[in-house]
Amino acid sequence: MKLAMLAPVAWRTPPEHYGPWEPIASLLTEGLVGRGVDVTLSVTLDSVTAAALDGVCPHGYATNARPTGAAAGRHRPGCSCPLRLLGTVPC
């Protein structure tokens, strides 16, 4: 069975500090992967998961920090990262 899990992109999944919905998505995803389900998690690129990661923007729009590592400067063509659209932080 294949499953796609969607989570908000306000913070990474699981969040480092705060996030009301991201921990739920993380716990569900990790539990399903642990049971052998083929899960793809669609979240920010700086998220941490055992599932296949399908990042939709480099970092959460509620995060003030600049992305580092694999997430730095990565956008898909036509990315709708809120920070990029607002022009407040060049991702």
Image (cartoon, helix red, strand yellow):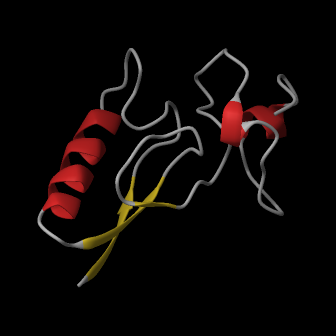
Specify whether 64 is left or right of 43. Answer: right
The one nearer the camera, 55 or 52, is 52
**Where residue 75 appears, x then y in whole percent?**
78, 51
Name the image quarter holding the C terminus: top right
The one nearer the camera, 73 or 7, is 73
Q: Is residue 58 above or below residue 1?
A: above
**Where residue 87 appears, x then y in whole percent?**
88, 30
Q: Quadrant of residue 76?
A: bottom right
Residue under the image location 48 percent in, 34 percent down: 12
**Where residue 31 appears, x then y in whole percent?**
15, 54
Single out the residue that lies furthest toward the left. 35
Q: Is residue 29 above or below residue 4?
A: above
Specify whether 62 is left or right of 76. Answer: left
Specify whether 39 is left or right of 53. Answer: left
Residue under the image location 17 percent in, 71 percent down: 36
Q: Quadrant of residue 32?
A: bottom left
Q: Is residue 19 above or below residue 40?
A: above
Name the image quarter holding the N terminus: bottom left
Residue under the image location 34 percent in, 53 percent down: 50
Q: Is residue 34 above or below residue 7?
A: below
Single out the residue that lies furthest toward the bottom. 1
- Tally the marks: 0
Q: Quadrant of residue 84?
A: top right
